[in-house]
Image (tube, rainbow, N blue to C red):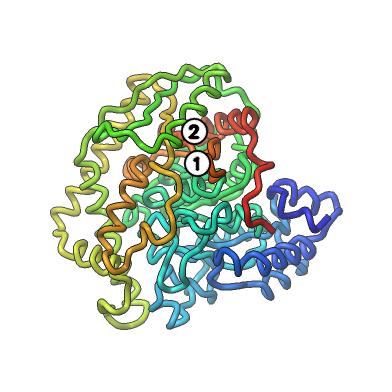
Amino acid sequence: MTDDLGLLDATAQAELVRNGELSPTELVAAAIARAEKIQPQINALTTERFDRARDEAASLELPDGPFRGVPFLFKDLACGYEGEPCYDGMSVLKDADFRLPQDTVLASRFRAAGLVTIGRTNTPELGIMPTTEPLSYGPTRNPWDPTRTPGGSSGGSAAAVAAGMTPFAHASDGGGSIRIPAACCGLVGLKTSRGRISVAPSGDLARPLSVQFAVTRSVRDCAALLDAVAGSEPSDMVHAPAPLRPYREEVGANPGRLRIGLCTTIPTTGEPVDAECVAATELGAKLLEQAGHTVEFAHPSVLEDGGISATFLAMWNGMAASNVARAGRLLGRELVEADVEPLTWFLAQSGGKTSAVELMDAQFAIQTVSRRLAAWWDVDGWDLLLTPTIGSPPPKLGVLMTPDEPLKGFARGAGFVPFTPIFNVSGQPAISIPIGTTASGVPIGIHIAAAWGREDLLIAVAAQLETAAPWSERRPQIHG
């Protein structure tokens, strides 16, 4: 039985423990064996936690949560346990062997759910790029095609899950970093609403673009894990509305007849994206129509506003500058150019030149864009927006990561992900579903966005698509 565990989602693995068919120790041992086998081929892990994981799995104090004994992975960015490594993709923190001063709230909730973390996964430096090729640990390879990127910034987590190391893994999303690697690796990637899951002790106002959750193999795992970890802390400034019922009850539920807009061109330019990405999205539209929904070409007019990109970039650069300064404070010295990657330094220098007025203007613009987007749902009466997740199939490694010419790769990255960042600006939930594949068999995701707080709709519709076009039997070239 343990030989087949890499094929099971987390819900199925948890059921084996509850039914007494396998122990947490056996689940975790099998996951570690798969990780040891797969890691040399895809380079998904940054640090191992194997011995602690074995001890936790065998402990009588392992929490009796919904995923008791199920193996898990942390993205090596902004989430983890007190006293354990967290390098944020930075060589300078890796060389200093930086350790977290306290548990993050989300890490504590993962633990309470019964999850046993076996290691941390690779991420680009500070999560900046939509590819996972940091100088600190080298590139993570897409298990479907090892010459290609798994996406980013949660590329290590997505590659590990796709290859069968663990059934799901922690991920975060500041511009598409959950959805992009999910699309590249054939997984479900839900970016939650701003305020749905607490990011404490980080500040939700200081990092308004970013949320944290996971990449999963199945929709039911996505729903059940969200039930386990959703919720705000009293100190949080943004609180998403509570769902009417548990998210797991949305799997298989009828969401009613929905009105869905479809957009397969870049809204700001009208330019087409890759034909295979369009074909996958059109397939998704057809399946949604067969499920009883109305799909027609339409999108919020605010998406055509080229100024949104400038707003996002101002916030992105400001976050880079703040993160570099924070890393320096953690090390007790100001960082210099040699401490970080060339692109990180460029963005941080640009962000450091942003005035307080410019930053406040960008924050004001975020609220303005959010209100204009909300009107498309709340006033115009649309339920969902369907687009491609990415603008092209996953590119070859080295196309987006160009240290000698950092801005070249950065510009290519923007063209690779024209649809995801806007929903980080607005704070709305969005999900990538692995409906399509290229002619060569590499996954392509489709992207569905909903009104703020409506993860329930996304899960219900994603479950309909999973039933209509199952993806669970697909296996990448590299799999444990």
Regarding residue 461, the answer to whether it shows in the image is yes
Callout 1: SS: strand
Residue at x 21% of width, y 62% of height: 351
- Dot 2 alpha-carbon crowd within 10 angstroms: few under 14, some 14 to 19, many 20 or more: many
Q: Which of 9 and 246 is in front in this view?
A: 9
- Report the residue that reaches farthest toward the front: 440
- Residue 280 - label: 2
Circles 2 and 1: CB atoms closer than 8 Å: yes
Callout 2: SS: helix
**Is 162 placed above or below 449 here?**
below
Regarding residue 232, the answer to whether it shows in the image is no
As measured in the structure, the alpha-carbon distance from the residue carrying label 2 to the one carrying label 1 is 7 Å
Name the residue carrying label 1. Answer: 444
- Residue 155 - label: none
- First of labels 2, 1 by sequence position: 2
**Is 349 placed above or below 207 here?**
below
Residue 306 picture quarter: top left
- Dot 1 alpha-carbon crowd within 10 angstroms: few under 14, some 14 to 19, many 20 or more: many
Q: What is the three-letter code of the residue carrying label 1?
A: Ile
